Image (spheres, rainbow, N blue to C red):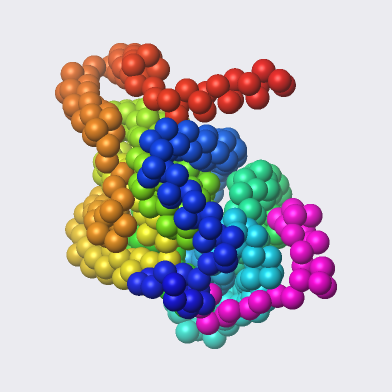
């Protein structure tokens, strides 16, 4: 076997004798004993589900708080003021995703590998490089953003937007540091720490601070200050959690750190740009609406985007836990096991996400009625965005394989294709169609990106998310959804709500009765036992 540092493909990556032995024995056992693979899959699937459940609970709380914040601010600031806030947070999110230079992704992949194979020296070296890099890059990106606006390099003639960006620029540094700390927590599968720092602290503090800002008459600027403060507090919490877990390793003078910066950066930098492109693909329509339309349209569209992204909740929960598992399985060459787990995780996503998509796709006007009537004009945009998100959800676990198997450059190319398409479609459609054009552009680009990743993972690793049960489930959802949409046309609000609720409840009962597998039952038994003890 050729040793080649941390090279990913096409050569086989360097592994310790421990990891090599584990991979050989495990693969050999799986091939020779057909009973071993189902047991191993059930155990691994149960572990993924356990971690995903923690992230899912945190994610539900996060989405609920973020949606409450959106509802509160969309009314308190008005469509124009809320559009300004949406623009500022969008810019901070995009720049904040680039600022870690991919060290968060590098920590997740390499950290998971080194923890699994007990390569403490290499793990320590990776932690040093990642933390040292973001300690410099985070503040640099924040200062550069502030200077670009202050010196008139960007946003000339847009004083409101310029003031919002200078006010939020400090958050970029905190977002970068938080991302790397959370990456370290995820690499050790500390989903509780990840949930507390990222999913609970940031949205809760933002909401509370926003409420204080509105009550004291500080307006949009005060809300932005609350956003910055929320990320600072989250960094403090994540730092404490990280230090309690890895502080002994950092302080242990007997473990000499092995640093491989070239290999780490060769993976992390393309992945960093790919992540930025993913965020840009989600938010470039906000930026282009700001440039080509009005802040009122931005505010209305932002509400539709927030509702559409509710569908990403189970994706975030499952892929957060699935990522380290992918890195471990690719490192030990257990591709058949990875393929089987991919099908299981994808099926879970379809089951969990289907009810939510039913509700939003069939009742968009009713869902939007919780907001001010001014936001009802976003109903058609919401439908289009949800359609694009549905394709993204189905392909998301496959995309996680592409990134966690080390194909960061390929993922970057996919991002460039999607964002280029998104920008072109936005420029073409927004002047004539407004928020509807932005939705078409975003959904199209996201769908193409998702399909590209599915094809590439199949070509590279022969892994596919499609199983017979998943295909049947997806087909039933499409048929039932289309039929329900047609049948309920023209009915009143309460009749439509009742009809959709009945169909969703019936579908869940039928799945519970006829659709469960051995992995599902093992996971259910585990959670029953855990809650029974409590």
> Which residue does the image show at 42% across and 57% down from the upper left?
333
Residue 127's place in the image compared with 212, above or below, is below
- Residue positioned 47% across, 23% down in the render: 521
User: Main structural element of the magenta stretch: helix, strand or loop?
Assistant: helix
Q: Position of residue 379 (x, y in %)?
A: 30, 39
Does residue 505 appear anywhere in the picture? no
Magenta span of residues:
238-264
| On-image quarter of the C terminus | top right
Query: With 493 as the anchor, is 204 left or right in this view?
Result: right
Q: Which residue is found at the position 44% from the left and 72% from the top?
A: 1
333 to 373, vertically: above or below: below
Residue nearest the observer in this picture, 256 or 54 = 256
Residue 405 in view = yes
User: Residue 119, located in which quarter of the rendered image?
Assistant: bottom right
Q: Is residue 390 left or right of residue 199?
A: left
Q: Position of residue 133 (x, y in %)?
A: 63, 77
Instruction: Using the image, determine if residue 434 lies above or below residue 174.
Output: above
* Position of residue 454 measured from the top left corner of the image (x, y, whole percent): 28, 53
């Amino acid at each position: 076997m050729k040793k080649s540092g941390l090279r990913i493909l096409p050569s086989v990556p360097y592994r310790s004798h421990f990891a090599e032995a584990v991979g050989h024995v495990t693969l050999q056992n799986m091939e020779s004993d057909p009973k071993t693979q189902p047991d191993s899959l059930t155990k691994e699937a149960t572990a993924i589900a356990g971690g995903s459940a923690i992230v899912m609970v945190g994610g539900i709380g996060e989405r609920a708080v973020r949606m409450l914040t959106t509802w509160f601010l969309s009314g308190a600031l008005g469509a124009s003021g809320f559009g300004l806030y949406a623009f500022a947070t969008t810019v901070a999110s995009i720049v904040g995703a680039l600022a870690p230079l991919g060290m968060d992704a590098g920590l997740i992949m390499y950290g998971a590998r080194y923890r699994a194979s007990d390569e403490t020296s290499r793990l320590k070296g990776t932690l040093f490089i990642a933390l040292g890099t973001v300690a410099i890059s985070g503040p640099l990106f924040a200062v550069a953003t502030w200077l670009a606006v202050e010196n008139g390099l960007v946003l000339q003639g847009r004083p409101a937007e310029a003031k919002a960006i200078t006010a939020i620029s400090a958050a970029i540094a905190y977002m970068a540091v938080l991302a790397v700390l959370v990456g370290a927590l995820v690499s050790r599968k500390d989903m509780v720490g990840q949930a507390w720092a990222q999913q609970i602290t940031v949205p809760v503090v933002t909401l509370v601070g926003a409420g204080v800002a509105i009550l004291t008459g500080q307006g949009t600027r005060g809300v932005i200050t609350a956003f910055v403060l929320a990320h600072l507090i989250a960094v403090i919490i994540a730092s404490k959690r990280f230090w309690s877990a890895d502080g002994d390793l950092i302080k242990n003078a007997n473990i000499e750190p092995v640093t491989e910066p070239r290999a780490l950066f060769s993976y992390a930098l393309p992945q960093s740009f790919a992540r930025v492109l993913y965020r840009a693909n989600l938010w470039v329509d906000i930026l282009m609406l700001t440039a080509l339309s009005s802040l009122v349209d931005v505010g209305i569209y932002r509400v539709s985007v927030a509702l559409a992204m509710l569908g990403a909740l189970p994706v975030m929960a499952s892929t957060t836990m699935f990522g380290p598992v992918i890195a471990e399985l690719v490192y030990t060459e257990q591709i058949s096991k990875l393929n089987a787990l991919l099908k299981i995780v994808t099926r879970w996503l379809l089951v969990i996400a289907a009810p939510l998509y039913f509700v939003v796709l069939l009742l968009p006007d009713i869902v939007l009625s919780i907001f001010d009537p001014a936001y009802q004009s976003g109903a058609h945009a919401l439908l289009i965005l949800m359609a694009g998100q549905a394709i993204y959800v189905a392909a998301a676990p496959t995309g996680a394989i592409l990134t966690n198997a080390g194909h960061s450059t390929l993922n970057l190319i996919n991002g460039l294709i999607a964002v280029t398409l998104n920008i072109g479609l936005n420029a073409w459609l927004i002047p004539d169609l407004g928020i509807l054009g932005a939705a078409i552009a975003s959904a199209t680009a996201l769908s193409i990106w998702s399909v590209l990743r599915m094809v590439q993972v199949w070509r590279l690793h022969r892994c596919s998310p499609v199983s017979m049960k998943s295909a049947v489930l997806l087909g039933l959802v499409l048929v039932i959804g289309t039929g329900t949409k047609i049948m309920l046309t023209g009915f009143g609000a309460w009749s439509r709500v009742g009809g959709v609720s009945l169909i969703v409840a019936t579908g869940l009962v039928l799945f519970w009765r006829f659709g469960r597998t051995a992995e599902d039952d093992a996971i259910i038994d585990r959670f029953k036992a855990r809650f029974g003890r409590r």
